Image (spheres, rainbow, N blue to C red):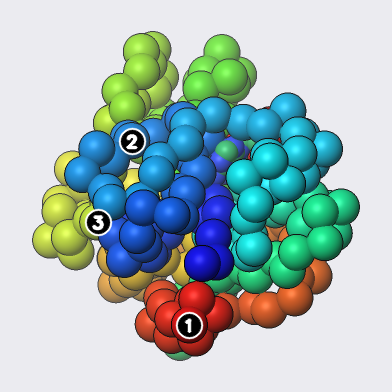
Amino acid sequence: MKRILLLGGVTEALAIARTLGPEHIYSLAGVGRVPTDLTCEVRVGGYGGAEGLAQFIRDEGIDLLLDATHPYAAQISHNATTAAQLSGIACWALRRPAWQPQTGDDWRDISDWAELIEALKPFHRPLFTLGREPLQHLHEIPPEQFWTLRALDVYPGNERCEVIGARGPFLIEDERELFERRQIDVLISKNSGSTATEPKLEVARERGVPVIVLQRPMLPGVDRELLTLQETLDALATFVQ
Ligand code: NAP
């Protein structure tokens, strides 16, 4: 019997976890919702770095580590490859292809917060879809700007920022309404490659709104890179035979 340790964090990871039997483990950091209706074991919380993860792999007799974490969760991906090497098992990763700009898009790449602030200068009503990081900068909002910040949960904003708590998938009609209601003149996004959050890009294109894109972090090489959910399910089915 082969055992898989699945590192989750994205929609596809949960879909994979739903197909796994009780001998396999689905691992979550504990920042989002924890499913309670899975057949496989669910483990919540970190391992204390790559060494801790390697120890867990050895203790549990894991045969394959599958990294299905978010493309911007670089730390756990680096830990995964190191831990797999330390424990002598293979590490596979499900890596969604990045979104590509299409005709009519005005995308501007940035790599950190300082570049983002510079890129934002010509705009007045940005929509942030970067998660919680902008919350640390609410006191820095220039007087000519009003921010809309969307995160998984609602957090306090201030007189220059409204925080919206919402979880995808997002419908294009709702995104259109949001851009119109908030009069968004620039969108700030990671390049997650997820279909669940892609409609905002379509609305930005329709409205001629520029998109400031936080570049993806460098991720480590793995033994096998999988691009889609189906490809991953097929590979796993062969692996456990
Ligand atoms: P990160 O910086 O790469 O990881 C931080 C630490 O969280 C890791 O070192 C590890 O702790 C723990 N961790 C992360 N994923 C884990 C998992 N699947 N199982 C057990 N421990 C895990 O990650 P992050 O950017 O904070 O994201 C945290 C989680 O949220 C990830 O699982 C990611 O897939 C998900 N997520 C992230 C984003 C994003 O934009 N970053 C978006 C959506 C979902 P130890 O070192 O103690 O093992």
Task: Look at mark 1 in the image and give the residue it sits on.
Answer: 241
Q: Is residue 79 visible?
A: no
Could you give the CA–CA distance between mark 2 and mark 1, rounded to whole angstroms?
28 Å
Look at mark 2 in the image and give the residue it sits on.
34
At horizontal 39% and vertical 23% (from top left) the residue drawn is 161
Sequence-wise, which precedes: disc 3 or disc 2? 2
Q: Quick check: is the Cβ at mark 3 less than 8 Å away from ligand 1?
A: no
Categorize mark 3 by other alpha carbons within 10 Å: few (<14), some (14-19), many (20+): few
The residues bearing labels 1 and 3 have C-alpha atoms spaced at a distance of: 34 Å
Instruction: Left or right? Give the position of 86 relative to 76.
Output: right
Q: Which mark is residue 169?
A: 3
Q: Residue at x 65, y 78 (%)?
A: 225
At mark 1, the secondary structure is loop
Q: Nearer the viewer, residue 217 or 178?
A: 217
Of label 1 and label 3, which has the lower sequence position?
Answer: 3
> Closest to the observer: 18 or 186?
18
Choose mark 1 or mark 3, whichever is in front: 1
Q: Which residue is rendered at x = 51% and y = 22% of the image?
A: 135
Mark 3 or 2: in front is 2
Q: Circles 2 and 1: CB distance less than 8 Å? A: no
**Rendered location of residue 110, percent (x, y):** 70, 54
- Looking at the rendering, the quadrant in which ligand 1 lies is top right
CA gap between label 3 and label 2 equals 17 Å
Crowdedness near tag 1: few (<14), some (14–19) or many (≥20) residues, C-alpha within 10 Å = few
Query: Three-letter amino acid code at disc 3?
Result: Pro
Check disc 1 and give the amino acid type.
Gln
At numbered mark 3, what does the secondary structure look like: helix, strand or loop?
A: loop
Q: Nearer the viewer, residue 184 or 239?
A: 239
| Residue 40 falls left or right of residue 166 | right
- Give the amino acid at mark 2: Val
